[in-house]
Amino acid sequence: MAATYHFKILTPGDMVLDDEIVSMIAPGEAGYLGILANHAPIITTLKRGTLRVRFGDTEKWYHIDGGILRVAGNSAVLLSESVEEVPAES
């Protein structure tokens, strides 16, 4: 089983996600970045785009309106003005 880490997605009015995940691919300002368990600490800005989140055998996709991503201590928090779950792309 793949290692997991805790991940939260927050908007000003809602907690969109609060779960253990295996990985994410986020739309960073300088390009897409992948985050796995035990990633080095990082704080970065995100641009508008698609966030891909893997939970073991399943995956969810979210459209985010930019934001800030903080990764530290085997957990991550994404803050965004707007987040909407979208159907997974093929």
Image: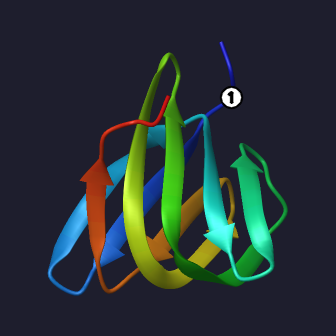
Residue at 75% from the left image edge and 60% from the top image edge: 33
Looking at the rendered structure, the secondary structure element under dot 1 is loop
Q: Indicate whether 7 appears above or below 64.
A: above
Q: Identify the residue shown where x is 53% and y is 34%.
A: 54
- Going by the numbered disc 1, the residue's amino acid type is Ala
The image quarter in which residue 58 lies: top left
Residue at 68% across, 28% down: 3
Q: Quadrant of the N terminus?
A: top right
Q: Residues within 10 Å of mark 1 (few under 14, many from 20)?
A: few
- Give the percent coordinates (x, y) of residue 59: 45, 31
Residue 25 in the image, given as x and y percentages of width and height: 64, 52
Q: Percent x, y for residue 82?
A: 29, 78
Label 1 sits on residue? 3
Q: Is residue 81 left or right of residue 24?
A: left
Observer-nearest of 44 and 27: 27
Position of 34 with respect to 16 (left or right) is right
Residue 39 appears left or right of 58: right
